[in-house]
Amino acid sequence: MALIPATILTGFLGSGKTTLLKRVLSEAHGQKIAVIENEFGEENIDNEILVADTNENIIQMSNGCICCTIRDDLRATLNDLAQKKRKGELDFERVVIETTGLADPGPVAQTFFMDDEVAEQYLLDAIVTLVDAKHAAQQLNDRQEARRQVGFADQIFVSKADLVDKDEVDALIHRLKHMNPRAPMRPANFGEVAIKEVFDLRGFNLNAKLDIDPDFLKADDHDHGHHHDHDHEHGEHCNHPSHQHGHEHGHHHHHDDDVKSFVYRADRAFSPEKLEDFLGAIVQVYGPRMLRYKGVLNMQGTDRKVIFQGVHQLMGSDLGPLWGEGEKRQSKLVFIGIDLPRDILEQGLEQSLV
């Protein structure tokens, strides 16, 4: 049986996750979707689209979708749903897990890799994060959970952008890109996003594409990514109100966010043994602070690209396509995490080269 694709929908309180979900559920795309809500808050999916609120925690909806609350743990709910689908008791094609506004998507994502039963039935497609433009600066300053949700995302939607002026939205996007240069960012007004921007994003696929925002890379080009003292000099023109408090620590012009990303590139090939030892050691120590990381690597001893990616301590790798004729063999890695020791990482990667 084909794996059931799953999407994790996360985002700041009040960012419009429910609005987005309602729209996705009512859009005429002909897909049947099971929604797992981490808890039915005050703003749960409207009762008028729920057919019956039975005491079971699975509720059938009028459009053929179903809705469940997690009263017990996620694994049990997922296995229960898959079993009912196999028996023909429930009909759905994909699952959306809506986490509460302050949840950390990390453990939810890990469930799809750690639990064999879940991994045999589901394919984690992507983590989608909604950021509320009106309250973002405050929430990002005050709440680490909000920053983590940004770091984990495969796709970011900025909601309520129409309520703030353009400069503020630009400043916010600039800030978000420093935290996570691999997630595309799009505005989402009142949940109006095309279904293809939410589903089948393949954020966890081991594919040879490492999309990093090109402006992010350009800004770093002048230092070849190997000095440890630059921390994005191009931050000088940032004068976002939410940074001003950072100026008493000497003048850092960059964001004081603890969730940061950096990109490492190398033209020399990696030694497979050295790199494996180094990455293995790094995730042991820093795994809890490593949110997402991915690399497309030029590895000694193979003509194929080697692709690796991870969430926290869980790391997977795979042989990708052949390097193209005349294609420059260059390794490119991106790390997104909380206060990661960039110099230790860069030094270790450097020493893992042939």
Image (spheres, rainbow, N blue to C red):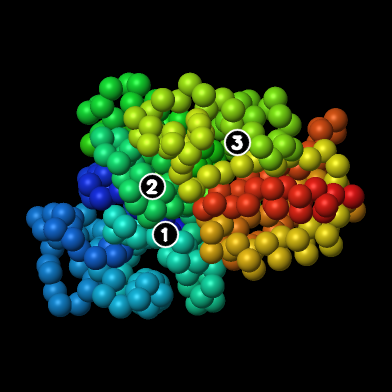
Q: Amino acid at mark 1?
A: Pro
**Mark closer to the observer (3, 2):** 3
Residue 165: % across, % down: 28, 22
Q: Amino acid at mark 2?
A: Thr
Indicate whether 125 appears above or below 217. Answer: below
Mark with earlier residue (2, 1):
1
Q: Nearer the viewer, residue 319 or 260?
A: 260
Residue 51: % across, % down: 13, 63
The CA distance from mark 3 to mark 1 is 27 Å
Q: Which mark is residue 129?
A: 2
Left or right side of 128 for 304: right
The CA distance from mark 2 to mark 1 is 10 Å
Q: Amino acid at mark 3?
A: Asp
Characterize the local packing of mark 1: few (<14), some (14-19) or many (20 or more) Cα atoms within 10 angstroms: many
Query: Do labels 2 and 1 touch, CB within 8 Å?
Result: yes
Left or right side of 52 for 212: right
Indicate whether 152 appears above or below 211. Answer: below
Please tell me whether mark 3 sits on a helix, a strand or a loop: loop
Residue 14: % across, % down: 22, 47
Question: Would you name the residue on which mark 3 appears?
Answer: 231
Characterize the local packing of mark 3: few (<14), some (14-19) or many (20 or more) Cα atoms within 10 angstroms: some
**Mark closer to the observer (3, 1):** 3
What residue is drawn where x is 26% and y is 44%? 15
Please tell me whether mark 2 sits on a helix, a strand or a loop: strand
What residue is drawn where x is 32% and y is 21%? 166
The CA distance from mark 3 to mark 2 is 25 Å
Specify whether residue 202 is in view.
no
Q: Which mark is residue 105?
A: 1
Mark with earlier residue (3, 1):
1
What residue is drawn where x is 51% and y is 35%? 250
Residue 253: % across, % down: 50, 30
